[in-house]
């Protein structure tokens, strides 16, 4: 990569290539030289009876190089530390202007030599860059070029003519604020400028240890509870598949790490679902690990994972009470930070109600749980609840509790009775 002198180094190399072209025979133009001025300054050179002669290289635009910027790797790790030096990839747009005695057609002759020279040197090779920097680095005004390292850039700078429409030429020279002079636009790509900042690197590896172990892919084919019902807090999950058991397996679900029953086999793994697994839809996986070694200090390492299968954990409604103008609904597992809950209460029919009376349903949506300890009791106001018996259901992150069936085949619990 190059340092911050790279742009000036490209301009000086272009100047060097063009100077060699107009100095060469045949058809030299007397007094010719290559400048790096603004076009308005070029127009002020010389006098009408003694016009200045030469070429001018003017950098009028710098744009990011999309190809290099899209392939650039992240420069910082997740902790924010610098893992590689940031690189700015740039394209440079130049205006090569010819000036001289118009009746003698000197601008046309000079621009033709410039176009031929840049067509013959479409790539600024290491030798050309080093020769140009050595020449202009010896001059007082451009002595800084001695510190330029453009020649060491991994990708050489390439030149290509940029055709401009009449409208673009008019706008460009209008912005430059000077009458038009015979010119040709070129694009130099790509200049890679690297920040000179320290990078944090890991210490070198002193010893390499290669441990070869047989690998058996774990595959979960099905997950169900031992009683065939939905998964709730306290349920026993039975995982069927192949390659599930190992010396040190465990099951991950909902951010919790579940201990595998010691009687589990390669085709059948049994775990209990604790209250630390929140309600909702989760990905369930079997993970094989190599335990930490206290003697060598080696940490625990994951050596294999099964496929992930979805598991819906339903909330369970416990005791429901009413007091102080609120209904208090106990729920398991408790709600954790960020979870959303909806409590739905449906009034059960009373024998005194007319047969065709439609029973009301009231739903209370709770805001997402804030940061803090898990919440096992949900409080909702009873303003919209009339006296009677209300069936209570709770939905958490899309997983809804299932009421209990009574003797008559209808849902009758959990309920709250309001006087």
Image (cartoon, grey):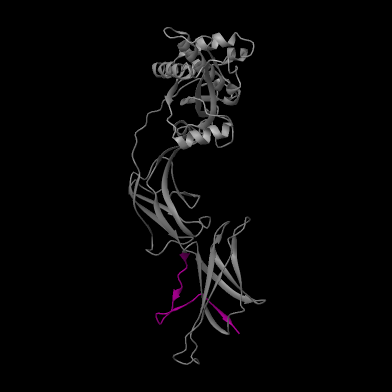
Looking at the image, which is closer to me, 119 or 203? 119
Which of 241/11 is in front?
A: 11
Confirm whether residue 301 shows in the render: no
The reply to whether residue 60 is visible in this rendering is yes
Residue 338 inside the magenta-drawn segment? no
The residue sitting at the right extreme is 324
Which quadrant is the C terminus positioned in? Answer: bottom right
Q: State yes or no: residue 409 in magenta.
A: yes
> What is the x, y in percent for residue 25?
43, 7
Question: Quadrant of the rendered structure where residue 4 is?
Answer: top right
Q: Is residue 287 above or below residue 117?
A: below
Image spot of residue 383 (x, y percent): 62, 79
- Provide residue 17's location: percent of width, then percent of height: 47, 14
Q: Which stretch did the figure color magenta?
A: 399-419
Q: In the rendering, at what x and y percent does residue 47 appear?
A: 60, 17
Work out whether residue 18 or residue 358 is closer to the camera in this orientation and state it.
18
Location of residue 143 with respect to 387 vertically, above or below: above
Q: How many marks?
A: 0
Residue for point 60% across, 66% down: 377
């Amino acid at each position: 990569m190059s340092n911050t002198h790279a742009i000036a180094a490209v301009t000086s190399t272009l100047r060097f290539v063009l100077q060699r072209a107009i100095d060469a025979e045949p058809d030299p133009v007397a007094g010719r030289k290559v400048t790096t001025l603004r076009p308005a300054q070029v127009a002020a050179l010389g006098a009408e009876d003694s016009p200045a002669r030469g070429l001018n290289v003017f950098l009028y635009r710098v744009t990011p190089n999309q190809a290099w910027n899209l392939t650039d790797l992240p420069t910082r790790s997740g902790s924010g530390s610098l893992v590689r030096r940031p690189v700015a990839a740039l394209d440079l747009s130049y205006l090569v202007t010819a000036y001289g005695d118009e009746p003698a057609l000197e601008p046309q002759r000079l621009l033709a030599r410039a176009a031929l020279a840049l067509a013959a040197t479409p790539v600024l090779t290491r030798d050309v860059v080093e020769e140009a920097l050595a020449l202009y680095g010896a001059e007082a005004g451009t002595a800084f070029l001695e510190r330029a390292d453009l020649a060491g850039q991994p990708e050489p700078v390439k030149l290509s003519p940029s055709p401009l429409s009449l409208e673009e030429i008019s706008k460009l020279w209008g912005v430059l604020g000077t009458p038009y002079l015979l010119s040709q636009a070129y694009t130099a790509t790509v200049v890679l400028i690297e920040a000179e900042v320290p990078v944090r690197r890991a210490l070198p590896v002193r010893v390499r240890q290669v441990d070869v172990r047989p690998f058996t892919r774990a595959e979960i084919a099905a997950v169900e509870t031992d009683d065939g019902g939905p998964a709730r807090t306290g349920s026993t999950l039975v995982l069927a598949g192949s390659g599930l058991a190992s010396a040190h397996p465990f099951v991950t679900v909902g951010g919790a790490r579940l201990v595998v029953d010691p009687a589990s086999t390669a085709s059948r793994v049994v775990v209990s679902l604790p209250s630390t697994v929140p309600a909702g839809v989760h990905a369930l996986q079997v993970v094989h690990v190599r335990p930490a070694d206290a003697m060598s200090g080696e940490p625990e390492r994951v050596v294999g994972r099964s496929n992930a299968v979805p598991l819906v954990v339903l909330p369970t409604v416990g005791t429901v009470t009413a007091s102080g103008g609120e209904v208090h609904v106990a729920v398991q597992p408790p709600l954790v930070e960020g979870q959303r809950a909806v409590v739905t209460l449906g009034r059960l029919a009373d024998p005194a109600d007319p047969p065709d009376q439609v029973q009301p349903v009231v739903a209370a949506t709770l805001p997402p749980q804030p940061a803090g300890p898990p919440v096992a009791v949900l409080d909702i106001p009873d303003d919209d609840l009339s006296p009677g018996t209300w069936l209570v259901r709770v939905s958490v992150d899309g997983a809804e509790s299932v009421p209990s069936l009574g003797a008559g085949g209808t849902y009758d619990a959990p309920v709250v009775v309001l006087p």
